[in-house]
Image (tube, rainbow, N blue to C red):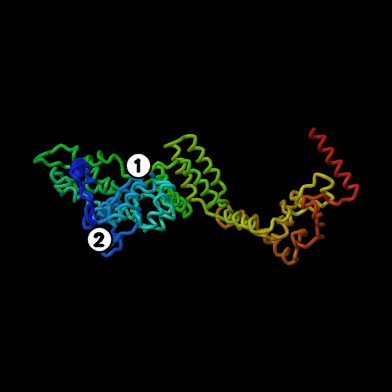
Amino acid sequence: MPKQQKTLFDSQREEALNRQAPLAARMRPRTLDEFVGQEHIVGEGKLLRRAISNDTLFSIILWGPPGSGKTTLARIIADTTHASFEPLSAVSAGVADLRRVVKEAQDRLGMFQQRTVVFIDEIHRFNKAQQDAILPYVEDGTILLIGATTENPSFEVNPALRSRARVFVLESLTDEQVGVVVDRALADTERGLGDLNVLLAADARGYLINMSNGDARTALNALEAAALAKAPGVGGKRLITVDDVRDALQSRAMRYDKNGELHYDAISALHKCVRDSDPDAALYWLGRMLDGGEDPLYIARRVVRMAVEDIGMADPQALPLTIAAQQAVHFLGQPEGDLALAQAVVYLAQAPKSNAVYAAYGAALRDVAESRNEPVPLHLRNAPTQLMKGLGYGRGYQYAHDYEDARVDQEHFPANLCGRRYYEPTGRGFEATVRERLAWRDERVAPARAAGATGAERLDAGGMRREPIPAPDPQVLAGEESQLPADDAAESSQTRRLAARKRK
């Protein structure tokens, strides 16, 4: 069935909007042949181009940065398809609007066998309930969905909805492509600036393209502002200079969203630059994040993590320095605190690297989670009462300060993890010294293993076995009443009475 005919009021409204619309809206491509960029998805022979041209579209999600052509593609589809096209903006629409559109789509399909294409701009602004509201109708084909988003659909679009639509990734326009859009607007007398006699100086054109950051909308709107503000000169020409463009732009088009994907991508890049010992690139990504409005305390927290994860014991000063940077940011604020972050980032980048502690702790946690939690070895337990001493608590413990270099050979792991080794210091930075200090571990491991000592046995200084430590009463370990001789039971009772008297 053909599309519904426009009324006189619809036509007049569109004409008025076209006259007063910004240049970017007026110059919006009307066909795929006018469309600039995104050759990887709408070039000749590509799937999406064939689907649009043949009016055999399926549900899609267009993901890309601002000014890359998401809404333009949706408009081209609207002008091409014989289906009814229903545009919605997630900024202002709600569940009631979705239900209305779905009801009309059902009636249209039942009465006229006509499909309905629903375009939802900024679909990431819909919450889960709103996205779930259209899911059944996308699934059964009542509507075809076109969603446009600047945010990663993996995080912002429900998996169930995302699985029923094909995601197409749009890229920022290149400088050459933005240049094509700008030149077209300057020459177009119907929709562009052709009748204003605008002359764009070569250096001004390069500056405009560079500062637009791949965003065609930003380039066109700045060009229009500069042209309208410029008084005609000799021969009615309007010469646009770099200063005119700078005044119109005010600042570079921002490509940073502290709540979006670039937030995570940028901090990942900063972390990897520090890990790879590149202070220059680390400063760049730090500047990108701070210039984009990122919370400096968030960066400070991540910088502290870099110190403990990637530098560790190779430079023990890294952690206190990053904590000092966090305190400086908190105390000074911006922009002074930014320098503290820059100093910390440069320090971490140049510091020797080690993830030995990070890896060792991870290995220890795996054993905690995946092995039997055996009791603490008896010789490592305190024995504040005679009862506990009688059970062997603390028996045979070797006090480190009584030995040369404060080193003793005794097992500290529970029986099932005897001889475990987690921390292996590298030979970089301070860890080279740590490695020397811990070399004695290797000297004791071989004799211990050769002797076959278990966790319930202790080794003497030469690595030889001593007499095994008596095992405790299992009822005690289980928290049950132990079957002790009468004198021990009386002693335990007296100890409890003394402790209760002290508490009073």
- State the image quarter where residue 199 is shown: top left
Query: Quarter holding the C terminus?
Result: top right
Instruction: Tell me, yes or no, if residue 17 can be seen here.
Output: yes
Query: In the orientation shown, which residue stands out farthest toward the front?
Result: 111
Q: Is residue 128 above or below residue 167?
A: above
366 or 95: which is nearer to us? 95
Query: In the orientation shown, which residue stands out farthest toward the top?
Result: 504
Left or right placement of residue 2 versus residue 262 in this view: left
Query: Quarter holding the N terminus?
Result: bottom left
* Picture coordinates of residue 161, whole percent (x, y): 41, 54
Callout 1–callout 2 Cβ contact below 8 Å: no
How crowded pointer 1 is (Cα within 10 Å; few <14, some 14-19, many 20+) is rated as few
Under tag 2, what secondary structure?
A: helix
User: Residue drawn 76% across and 61% down?
Assistant: 462
* Picture coordinates of residue 292, whole percent (x, y): 38, 43
User: Residue drawn 38% across and 57% down?
Assistant: 140
491 or 156: which is nearer to us? 156
Q: Which mark is residue 92?
A: 1
> Which kind of residue does numbered mark 2 sit on?
Ser
72 or 160: which is nearer to us? 160
The residue pinned by badge 2 equals 53
> Which kind of residue does numbered mark 1 sit on?
Ser
Rounded to the nearest whole Å, what is the CA distance between mark 1 and mark 2?
31 Å
- State the image quarter where residue 410 is shown: bottom right
Left or right placement of residue 357 versus residue 178 in this view: right
User: Residue drawn 73% across and 57% down?
Assistant: 411
* Picture coordinates of residue 159, whole percent (x, y): 44, 55
Left or right placement of residue 398 versus residue 440 in this view: right
488 or 310: which is nearer to us? 488
Instruction: Tell me, yes or no, if residue 179 can be seen here.
Output: no
Left or right placement of residue 31 versus residue 429 in this view: left
